[in-house]
Amino acid sequence: MEKESKTGGRNGDQGILIKNVRLEDGLNECRACAEVFIKDGVIMSIREEHEEGSLSPCGSPDRGIRVINGAGLVMAPGLVDVHVHFRDPGFTSKEDIHTGAQAAAKGGFTSVVMMGNTRPCPDSVHTLKAVLERAAAEGINIYSVANLTKGMEGKETVDYEALIRAGAAGFSDDGRPVLDGELLKRAFKELAPLKVPASLHEEDPSYIKNNGINEGEASRTAGIGGSDRMAEISMVKRDIGLALETGVRLVIQHVSTREAVGLIREGKKRGGDIHAEATPHHFTLTEEAVKKYGTNAKMNPPLRTEEDRLAIIEGLKDGTIDMIATDHAPHTREEKALEFTKAPSGITGLETALSLGLSELVGKGHLSLRELIRLMSRNPAEVYGLDAGYIEVGRRADIVLFDPDAVWIPREGEQASRSVNSPFFGRTLRGRVLYTICGGRVVYEATS
């Protein structure tokens, strides 16, 4: 049984004293046994447990201070996911802003950036403002990209400066590639001095017979054509070249091939303002998962080979890939029940992301806990210019508390998301979120 607090408001109206907790800020700070005092939405004090004195002037629960015993838990900055689909407006049978916020909070995320493949899509100031106004009512920090081109049609650029003033965190036509290289170059030239990310979905449809499945063993087994790896490689190569030429801040979304990892690595070495995402499903699963999970392992770009999976992990280890993002993509049960070639691509991911990172990356010795936290908080916040990814006195109290050793099994029907399209239901995972605190308020609490 789990308890979720009402999502609404940003400032803490109750002091919180967290005791006996291991503090990991994702950089250099690690305190094995800390006390952290939060009041009015802000981290007021941090000290080691063995230090003299009390953090709180009224450190008793009966005087308005809630005490959380953090023994055995890790405190980290609230997680940041810069690639989520809340399907709102237009597709709210799959998810909406409120259910998406609940799923994020359950997963330990206090800041998310929504993609713009909605109906209407946020290619205008009016639509973007309307979405952000509704998002502001939730208990976590919700940002949104605006579209890179009008109507996501790849034919005409939008008013980038006006949309930034309206609150755009970046620009993306995610779900669709920008095929017109000359138009994209013009967009990059406009965006470069603005220092906001252009975040690109890199799949050339001319290399794709059926999307969502790798052209290879998986497609042969299914008896259908798939997505050739060149769909991604060709566009990543083109767009890194354009980024180096224009100086734009480029984000390569959901990397799936080892060749793309190599291109990104080389682009960074050449001094480009180039960044990349890895999803938990791409560093955990391969195309073999399609045989077991069917359409719940269908996504764009598709799951590929073991060599690709290991190359993605290596990219996370050496900093080539500097963010973990879920690409949380809910769909209805009925849609995913369609035959493979007709079902939509995408899976939910917010509620299992941290556990998959702990299980597959930290637990298997690829990354330290500190490195994982940085990839899931500070790094994405810095790329998108968000006020997030910190645990510091005087800063907003956006925090996740999790048990890194807890073993749990996500089960269908227990999720906060409206949708159930995940291959990870029934899988034993390591590490569980127990509290998510945003702006000093507990927005998620696991009670058992």
Image (tube, rainbow, N blue to C red):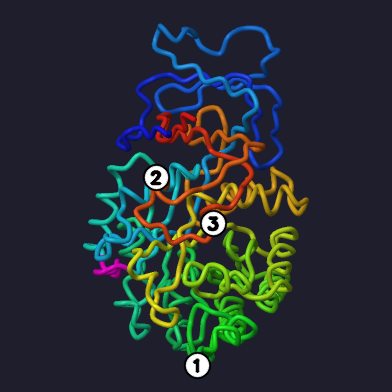
Residue 141, disc: 2
- The residue range painted magenta reads 118-124
Between discs 1 and 2, the one toward the N terminus? 2
- The quarter of the picture where the N terminus appears is top left
Q: What amino acid is found at the position of numbered circle 2 in the picture?
A: Asn
Give the answer, above or below, for where 448 lies relative to 249: above
Q: Which mark is residue 424?
A: 3
Mark in the foreground, 1 or 2: 1
User: Is 123 inside the magenta-drawn segment?
Assistant: yes
Q: Nearer the viewer, residue 325 or 72?
A: 72
- Secondary structure, mark 3, is loop
Write the residue at 32% across / 71% down.
159
Residue type marked 1: Ser
Residue visible at 34% across and 64% down in the picture: 332
- Return the x and y of residue 440 as percentages of the image width and height: 43, 29
Res. 250 in view: no
Q: Amino acid at mark 3?
A: Phe
For discs 3 and 2, the disc positioned in front in the rendered view: 3
Queried whether the magenta region covers residue 73, the answer comes back as no
What whole-number distance in Å separates the C-alpha atoms at marks 1 and 2? 38 Å
Figure quadrant of residue 140:
top left
**Are the two marked residues, 1 and 2, in contact with CB atoms closer than 8 angstroms?**
no
Question: What residue does disc 1 label?
Answer: 206
Q: Is residue 28 left or right of residue 382?
A: right
Q: Position of residue 427 (x, y in %)?
A: 58, 52
Label 1 Cα crowd, 10 Å radius (few <14 / some 14-19 / many 20+): few
Residue at 71% across, 26% down: 32
